[in-house]
Amino acid sequence: MGGERIRRVFVGLLFLGIYAGGCASKPAVKETIDPQAQAAKRFEQFWNAAFNTALGFPLQDFSAADGYIESEWIYKTPQERYRFFIYVLRDTAHNLDIEIQSQTRPTQKQGWQWDAPSVDIEENLKKAIHGAVVNHPSS
């Protein structure tokens, strides 16, 4: 009876060794990188980050299909306002383009005049979006 048990353990170890050796001898399958799938994932990451960042502002229009977000006019003061346009780009080295439009008026009774936008607004939006992509890459 003890010999039978030893034989079973030996046969079991023999099969385990053959199985493990067979698994180890199989070549590793390299994961192929699909450039289109990678670009689509990158677009989705930037779109989600841009949209979530833009939700902190009043929005005029947006389109996930086109990668486009437009804000309402945002008033810094009664005589100064700006709005932004965010474009999430596909198939480019940089995934983001932000345009800021700014207007001022001397008094509330006078009309709006185009003004040079503050670089800080664009930079703050870019930092927030890139930060969201880095902190939540799979969202």
Image (tube, grey):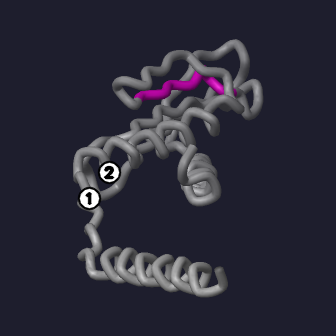
Question: Residue 137 location in percent, x, y?
Answer: 55, 53
Residue 30 seen in this snapshot: yes
- The image quadrant where one finds the N terminus is bottom right
The main secondary structure of the magenta stretch is: strand
Q: Nearer the viewer, mark 2 or mark 1?
A: 1
User: Are the two marked residues, 2 and 1, in contact with CB atoms closer than 8 angstroms?
Assistant: yes
Q: Residues within 10 Å of mark 1 (few under 14, many from 20)?
A: few
The residue located at (27%, 81%) in the rendering is 25
Res. 38 mark = 2
Question: In the image, which residues are magenta?
Answer: 68-74
The residue located at (50%, 77%) in the rendering is 12
Q: Residues within 10 Å of mark 2 (few under 14, many from 20)?
A: few
Question: Residue 38 location in percent, x, y?
Answer: 32, 51
The residue located at (24%, 76%) in the rendering is 27
The residue located at (29%, 45%) in the rendering is 37
Q: Is residue 94 left or right of residue 34?
A: right
- Nearest the viewer among 11 and 138 is 11
Question: Residue 111 location in percent, x, y?
Answer: 58, 16
- Nearest the viewer among 13 and 43 is 13
Q: Quadrant of residue 68?
A: top left
Q: Is residue 4 above or below residue 100?
A: below
The residue tagged 1 is 33
